Structure formats: C-alpha cells, structure tokens
Amino acid sequence: MVAQTCDLASEIDIAALTQTAIERFGRLDVAVNAGAMPLGGTVANTPPEDAMRSMEVNYLGSVHFVQHMAAAMETGGSIILLSSLASTHVMEHVYSYACAKAAVDCLVRYAALEYTYGNEEDHGRRSDSG
C-alpha cells in the first residue's frame, strides 16, 4: 500500500502518485481512488465556481486517475473508483457532488469498455451501501 498526499484536481499530483507506486512496488496491479470532496449546496444556491471545483476534484480527478493508473498497468489490473449513493438517489444539499459522482459512474462504464485487456467479464460493477 502507498499512502501519499494528492490533490485530485492536480494531474501532476496523480502522475506523481502513480510514479511513487511503481517505484515502490515495481508494477501496479490494483489502484483505488477513494478520495472525494463532498460539497454541500443546492442548484439554486451553489456558485458556479463551487460546482466546477466539485467536477474538477470528483470527476476530472477520477479521469486522470484512470488514465495514469491504467497506463502503468502493463499486464492488466483493477482500478476501483468509489462513488456515492447520492449519484443515483436524490439527496438534499449535495447536488454538485452528486452530479460529479454520477459522471464518475459513467466513467467507470467507459473505462471498463476501453481497458478490458482481453478479459471482458466482470467490469464496471456497482455496489451501493446505505
């Protein structure tokens, strides 16, 4: 396991995290993105810059995570992106976070399609708790 400070909105930080894992273990078999920035607010009261920040951290951070980690997995592996129940069930005061996590859910399906490495069974599984 590698634990390292990483700003998910920074592709440079994600690239550095990937490099640290490779240097420590020599290869990468599993990568888990459990990071998130829950941002409260409603459609009516959330400033656009807050909604964009939520997308940068929660969605684009996941895109960069998949891109860098998948590139480092030369012989295949597993990339796990944690989402949120809020992405499929409407909850009060979390709209921008929920929308960003819904985009992550969609990303999982597209990444599974692209990065199957010839093993197309059991990709893009969803598990909800709560």
Image (spheres, helix red, strand yellow):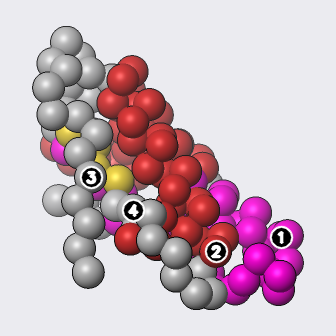
Query: In whole angstroms, how far apart are the C-alphas of marks 1 and 4?
Result: 22 Å
- In the picture of the structure, the residue carrying the numbered disc 3 is 126
Look at 39% across and 21% down and name the residue there: 114
Q: Give whichever of discs 3 and 2 has the lower sequence position.
A: 2
Q: Which residues are magenta?
A: 30-59
Query: In whole angstroms, how far apart are the C-alphas of marks 2 and 4?
Result: 14 Å
Q: Give whichever of discs 1 and 4 has the lower sequence position.
A: 1
- Between circles 2 and 4, the one closer to the viewer is 2
- Between circles 1 and 4, the one closer to the viewer is 4
Res 98 label: none
Query: In whole angstroms, how far apart are the C-alphas of marks 2 and 1?
Result: 14 Å
Q: Amino acid at mark 1?
A: Glu
Res 49 label: 1
Picture quadrant where residue 34 is located:
bottom left
Is the C-beta separation of discs 4 and 3 under 8 Å? yes
- Between circles 2 and 1, the one closer to the viewer is 2
Is the C-beta separation of discs 1 and 4 under 8 Å? no
> Within 10 angstroms of label 2, few (less than 14), some, or many (20 or more) residues?
many
Classify mark 3: helix, strand or loop: loop
Task: Give coordinates of residue 16: x percent, y percent.
Answer: 46, 48
- Between circles 4 and 3, the one closer to the viewer is 3
Picture quadrant where residue 119 is located:
top left
Q: Give whichever of discs 2 and 4 has the lower sequence position.
A: 4
- Residue 75 visible (yes or no): no
Classify mark 2: helix, strand or loop: helix
Query: In whole angstroms, how far apart are the C-alphas of marks 3 and 2?
Result: 20 Å
Q: Give whichever of discs 4 and 3 has the lower sequence position.
A: 4
